[in-house]
Amino acid sequence: MAAVSEEQQPRQTQPVVAGAAPPPPSSTGGFSSAGPAGPNPLSRKLRKVLETRLEADKEMLEALKALSTFFVENSLRTRRNLRGDIEHRSLAINEEFVYIFKQVKEELESINEDVQIMSNCCQDMTNHLKAAKEQTQDLIAKTTKLQAQNQKLELKALVADAFIAEFQLTPEEMNILRGTRDEPVTEKFFKVLGRVKQIHNDVKILLRTNQQRSGLEIMEQMALLQETSYEQLYRWAQGECRALTQESCDISPVLAQAMEALQDRPVLYKYTLDEFATARRSAVVRGFIDALTRGGPGGTPRPIEMHSHDPLRYVGDMLAWLHQATASEKEHLEALLKLITSDGLEENMQEVVGHITEGVCRPLKVRIEQVIVSEPGAVLLYKICNLLKFYHHTISNIVGNSAAMLLTTIEEMHLLSKKIFFNSLSLHASKLMDKVELPPADLGPSSALNQTLVLLREVLASHDSCVIPLDTRQADFVQVLSCVLDPLLQMCTVSASNLGSADMATFMVNSLHMMKTTLALFEFTDKRLEMLQYQIEAHLDTLINEQASFVLTRVGLSSIYNIVQQHKPEQGPLANVPSMDSMSLKAAMIQFDRYLSAPDGLLMPQINFLLSTSVKQQIVKLSTELVCRAYSEVYSAVMNPDNGYKDPETILHRSPHQVQALLS
């Protein structure tokens, strides 16, 4: 009944330790408490078990985990059979280990037998090898010696191959250098030629070693190959240059490489350049003649000779064509020599371009001389002169300042045109002096002066529009002005020499004003303008004095003013001098008052002939000041008590300030 009651009660699962017997049940269905004698040992064990912390005991956790794999039902029977189950399981595991290790043992025994067999075989082979070694020892020694000799021979062969590759040409390279004369030169030729030069330089190393003989032989061989190659290259380049006779030529890169290679042979290089220059010279001459007579392709542009009736355009077209041709030839030459690195290249190019353009100098000179000698007029001559100077400067920037024949020809034509131009101006000036005209009735500039100033204006206008250098323009300007203005001034002076002072001054002021107005429009005329202004001012002083004298004479103050200026105190009172009494002075003041009421009515006729309004106003203003100054001296003399005038305020009733205010 106790067992039954124990199964019916809820069971508490307790940890089971393998090999431990389950505790005996108590008669009351529980455990008896400890008597007064001491604690129950079973209670101590249970308490110890209950106080055990399984989390810290890893071995216990592993055991319980393994137990859980087969202890799936917690019953009385399974708990009682637990020890047996564990023992049976342990036995099964041990039997499995025994079976597996038995198989391992059998495999190891098999391996041991195989190893033993292999050991026996190796021993047999060792014995056989020892026997063979004893029998073939001499053969092995001979073989080793032969192998060492073979290695030495192979090394020598490698050295020989490297030597040949370094200091000899391959058959293909030899064929390239020794090609036929008609065969074109390609870039491969220059590569092989460069290799020959490199071998010739590198072989010098052999001369410092024991291989001097072979070094000398190789050097001689390479030198012979170089000379042969340069000769062949020169023949080819010469033929290519001779073919460049078209107006527009195309310089191939191979020809430029040929010139680069030939610079190592200065004589061949110069001969090739001469051949190029000769071919291009004939092409330029033919092109210039075609441009003169046939024009461009299809007649456009028209032949330059068609414009021979227009001298400026005719000369300008020829020079423009030559400028373009010179620039093109320099571009062709630069393309030919673009790889040249030697010194003096620029001077060499200038010399070649000068030789190329030398052929057109003769036909150009003949045509320009015809134009200049025909004397188309001073203005056209001056324009042609400036045009030649401009193209001389422009073309010199292309061909340099060397003694190029083309520049020399243009400079000669410039000097010729300049000489004839100044001869024309001198002839014109001499004609002016040969037939000096009298001044016109209105005292204005003469017709000869007007015509000469029109010529000068046209010359200076063409000079201002030209594009020659500034210093050259200034020097030409001074020479032109001297050649024209000096004869003009002389002509005007001679023409006015028979006139009165006022008429002469008026004519000269008008003529000088006309010259000044003409020059004021142009540059580099400052000095001439100052000189003309000084001359104008000198003649203006004459007109101012004449106008003041004219006014004083008309109002009756001229004689009075002269007496006042000449009178001295020791001569006595001024009132006792004839014509200086009060009545004479009052009569003069009546006329002077009329002048003050209408000062513009007393102007010399010559004043109205002046061309410049500002000059006219200046003369009137300054002459009025002289009149006021003269009146002021007369007034001071009359008001002086020593001169014996009674009631001088009734004689001169206006003060100098009042007169100046009325005339201003």
Image: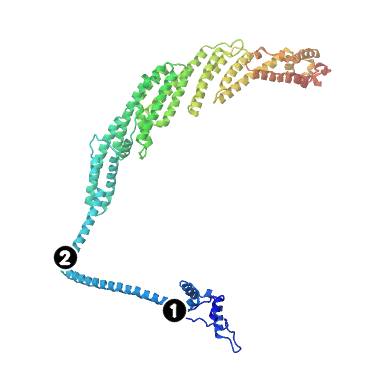
The CA span between labels 2 and 1 is: 80 Å
Q: Quadrant of residue 258?
A: top left
Answer few, some or many: residues within 10 Å of disc 2's Cα (few below 14, many 20 plus, some between 14 and 19). Answer: few
Left or right of 433, for residue 150: left
Near-viewer residue (368 or 243): 243
Q: Which mark is residue 379?
A: none
State the residue at coordinates (50%, 24%). 465
Snapshot colouring: rainbow
Instruction: Say which residue label 1 marks.
Output: 84
Counting residues from the start of the chain, the first of labels 2 and 1 encountered is: 1
Is residue 479 shown to the viewer in this render? no
The reply to whether callout 2 and callout 1 are in contact (CB within 8 Å) is no
Q: Which mark is residue 139?
A: 2
Instruction: Name the mark nearer the viewer: 2 or 1.
Output: 1
Q: Could you say where residue 569 lies in the image, as x and y percent from the top left? A: 77, 21
Q: The residue under label 2 is which amino acid type?
A: Leu
